Image (cartoon, helix red, strand yellow):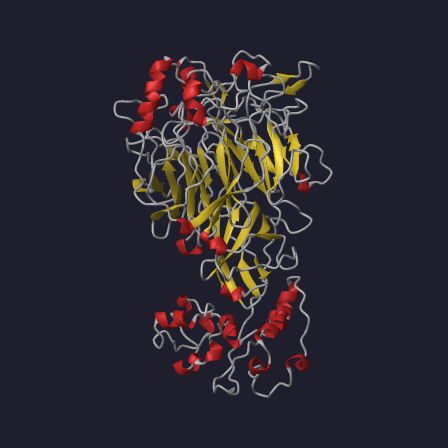
Amino acid sequence: MMHSLRFEVVIVTFVAFYFLIQHSNAQSTTIAADTTLGSWAMNGVSQLVTCIHSYLVPGSTITAPGLRPKLICVERPHGGGQGKYPPNPYTEPDNSRSNTAEIDLLASPGTATSVYAKISKSVNNPFCGGHAQMADGNIFHTGGDRESYTNPLTNIAILTDGTNINRIYTPYDNNASVTNPWSTAGTAMAQGRWYPSVLTISDGSQLIVGGVSVALSLDEYKAGKRTLNPTYEFYPSRGAAINLPILTENDPWNLYPFLNTMPISGKVWIFVGGPSILLDTTTGVTTALANMKETLHHPRIYPFTPTLAMLPLRPSNNYTATMIICGGTLRDIGVTNTTVTSSGTASNYCSKINPEATIPVWTENYIQWPGSGKVMPDVVLMPDGKLLYVNGATWGTAGGDAGVCSNAHDPSLQTFIFNPVTSTFARGPDFTVARLYHSGAILIPDGRIITTGSEEANYVDFPKILLNQCFPFNGTGSSNWTSVNNLASASCTTPFEYRIEVFTPAYYSLSRKPVINEAWGVSYPKAITFGSSFIIRFDTNASDVASISFIRYTTTTHSTNNDQRFVELSILYANYTHLYVEAPPNANIAPLGNWMLFPVATNGAVGHSITIKLATGAVSRVTVPQVTLVAGKKNSAGTSKRKVIGEVSKLANSAGITNTPITQQQYGQQVAGNQYGQYQSQYPQQQYHQQHQQNPNYPMQYPQQYSQYPQQQIPPNGYQQHYPQQGYANQQHAHYPEQQYAQPGYGRPPEQYSQPDYYPQ
């Protein structure tokens, strides 16, 4: 079914318009691409379906999840002998109208029947519905398309109207006995929803907002044929849908509204193109916030689609919610919202707001990325705290049937990276695969980013489309698709993009990458509860970890990712092999469900994440080691060593981490009054590493032991004044962060810290 902002014009006029648009919207790049910021490559794995809806799931729950992540993709149903589109070559040999693929992102390429991919079908059409990650790790997908099909040979329904259906996708690896991961959930909604938004809120339930039940295009809206669903409701159901006036007041600019739970109040921020409100999901009370006042843009919502993210939430910023919205379509002079078709240059402007400020006010168009604008961009929160902007077109709008390309056919291949700390943009390397309408981008557990989808892969054929030489679908309904549309010719391109492209950020390739031990449930917990503390075991130096980035598993469609969330976790204590970490305080800050925990080293290197489920339950806290400084005998260098007096090994065992006791004989004869001091000269570094992996009471080298002493327990007497910042860097000692030097020191003369064995290479 067509759902677009199409405009019908004489072909000659349209061709002239095409070349005019190409000329007028060419934008010069203000800076060149910086290839040191990362690189792009093809993943080598076919999506099997075109990823209009993309979900990331951890993969196996038997071995450590996240080590073999799965991408689940849902596409526009096509093929099945209906003739409107060519059949999907990967899923349609039996005309079954399969529309979903679950793909192992680390597997080798193969066909639809390969073991690395599972093909399934939601009989109730989920196309252009809304979705969210659930608290239990499954995917909630509501609403969809009215389009339905019956097998002409059997007269059995292949696909049915999905607009009012709630459904759940249970990944195959979450249930080994499942034959079809799709299932309906609860009773059908009273009114259908096409283009709704969904959010998992603080109590773990799903908030469903907006959508239309009949007709979508602007022309249908003008003709009075559109039926809006200006309400919200919940899953599990709390009763009848509730009216939400902001949706009616901003019709027709109200589809796929942006939703986000506020970290302080727990209220839901709902943004509808310019106006926004805070919704108390318990009482139903709404609070109107300041509107965007600028006239530079069309409403910043579908079809003038921008993208939105919440900047990282950190203890240091008191978990302040800063919402940043970027891209969209600029308003042409003299053009009103209701008369626009596909014209309009894409925007490279960003605006921001804190909806929980005492007086929330937009800072409008305060920054631009250094290159072409993007309508239909996607944004991804990266574990280094920066934001990646990809995908989209340089002019036009979202919408349209697959392959029509009339709304937007000039892709932006530029990559932009935003640093929230400095509030600056950089331009990264260009990507290869154009991502126009119905595309997406997702962070995966190893820290890379994948881009998916697009139903306008034939944008290069647009001049031929205008002449009806490569028209992408058959409006007559004939089953003889290729002969009707002349697409048997090799000169025409299929609209459906099946390839995955991968962005590898610079942090992925840095040295000293933190490595968490992969023993799931032993080296780290399977699940944590709010306010709890827990221990993570590392195969590398845990004291070199500067921060922990906690990023939620996500789903994305139509440049909208309401699941996306970044929370920095507090590090309570570190020694060479173990890190003591505190879970988020509550579900307002971090919603329930699956999260990726990324360790970030002092040099910015990002390690492979572990998957931890954030769940409800009692607070569980491990005892953080208490340390005492004691004087020891001088070693051969004339310096003193210190001993940690605590319960590190016992605490590690309480967390399920097994340590083998180390006897004195394994280290050699101890010298009274010199705890471990002489071992460094007797045993090579590698042996210390092996011994310490078994028992954290025996540090590999004493310089690393100093990182075990919490700053507040160190006697006053700093050595910041003795050593300039540059001097520290020259020592190449990663285990003493610069900010730690600024704190009270270890109470020793500066010359003792200059000895070689205090600064290992």
Q: How many marks?
A: 0
Q: In percent of the image, x 38 and y 24: which residue is there?
A: 249
Q: What residue appears at the point 56 percent right and 17 percent down from the top-left corner?
A: 482
Work out which residue is located at the far front of the displayed protein and give it: 490
Quarter of the view holding residue 69:
top right
Residue 365, image x, y percentages: 30, 39
Please provide percent x and percent y for residue 300. Answer: 37, 32
Residue 485 horizontal side relative to residue 121, left or right: left
Outermost residue toward the right in this view: 177
Does residue 157 lie above or below 447 as drawn?
above
Tell me where residue 472 appears, x and y as whole percent.
Answer: 50, 20
Estimate the x, y position of residue 530 in percent, counting from the top left: 55, 52
Could you tell me if residue 5 is visible in this image? Answer: no
- Decide which of 67, 115 is in the foreground and name it: 115
Q: Is residue 116 left or right of residue 207?
A: right
Between 153 and 273, the one nearer to me in the picture? 153
Using the rendered image of the protein, determine whether residue 379 is visible from the camera's viewpoint: yes
